[in-house]
Amino acid sequence: MDELSCLAPAKVNLYLKVLGRRPDGYHEILSLFQMVSLYDTLNICSLKKKNSLQLEGNFDCSSQENLICKAVEVFRKETGINQGWRIIVEKRIPAGAGLGGGSSDGATTLSALNTLCKTPLRPDQLIKLGLALGSDVPFFLEAPAACIGGRGDQIQPLVPRTDINLVIIYPGIKINTAAAYRWLNIKKLIDYGTFEPGVDAGKIIKMYRYKPVNQWKLENTFNAAIEERFPQISRLRKELKELGALYNGLSGSGSTVFAIFDRRSIAERAESLLAGAYTLVKKIDALDKIPVSTLKYM
């Protein structure tokens, strides 16, 4: 029996613009996704009992909502492989935080099952299954950094930058993504029918690739709406600015706030000063590759 040990990384939305509601009901977005060095750990091994699933971990959702369970289900349906699995998860990425923990777990499960079953699915087939699980899932199968468009299904991988000094702060507030979209003033967003996808995307890609970090112009459409409802996030952002952050804002729809600093030493000082005041404060690194799973022979 083989066991696969996997790291499922979090992501930060360095840039996120909600452009409007699409005809299919989803929202058109333009975003810059970056994998970072905060991980859930998944240990996956086979079971003798077919079609069984033993999932162990500290989750805040039902098995019907859990993307790991859904990943096992769609993988079995697509491949016809009815192998039983035991999956033990050590959660470090907080839920409802805008860090993509659930999506990363789902993507990592798909990739791990494909490896353990001797790769019955091609990468493009895995990505298609990932999109069926959730809009953010394909990114975690594709690249450590990418410009994201559409509903999250348009992924342009980028050569990752490793010169980004990041600190993330999770204030312990869980925010439902669907609710966050409802809080946006859709009338003030760009009309989807007039959006030209390549124009703004090209600017974001050029910025990420070529400009020094201290010249980046970043934004997040959710900042104002979330700060209005959660003044503690507004106070946190002001505190980060006073600590020397070049930029700070929500990751996704929050509630995690990330801050970019000019130097590592300033980021480490901010981490030290904020530690203990919030649920999670961590100096993190931008990843330059998707973590490789480790196969253990039992």
Image (tube, rainbow, N blue to C red):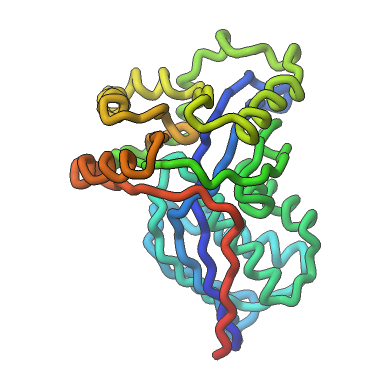
Q: Quadrant of the C terminus?
A: bottom right
Q: Nearer the viewer, residue 211 or 139?
A: 211
Q: Nearer the viewer, residue 94 or 175?
A: 94
The residue drawn where x is 26% and y is 25% is 242
Q: Residue furthest top?
A: 188
Q: Position of residue 170 (x, y in %)?
A: 33, 41
The residue drawn where x is 65% and y is 70% is 113
Q: Position of residue 251 (x, y in %)?
A: 46, 35
Q: Indicate the quadrant where residue 82 lies.
A: bottom right
Q: Nearer the viewer, residue 217 or 95?
A: 217
244 with respect to 105 (left or right): left
The residue drawn where x is 67% and y is 29% is 206
As displayed, is residue 288 above or below residue 170? below
Q: Position of residue 91 (x, y in %)?
A: 40, 60
Q: Indicate the quadrant where residue 203 lies.
A: top right
The residue drawn where x is 58% and y is 70% is 293
As displayed, is residue 215 above or below residue 276? above
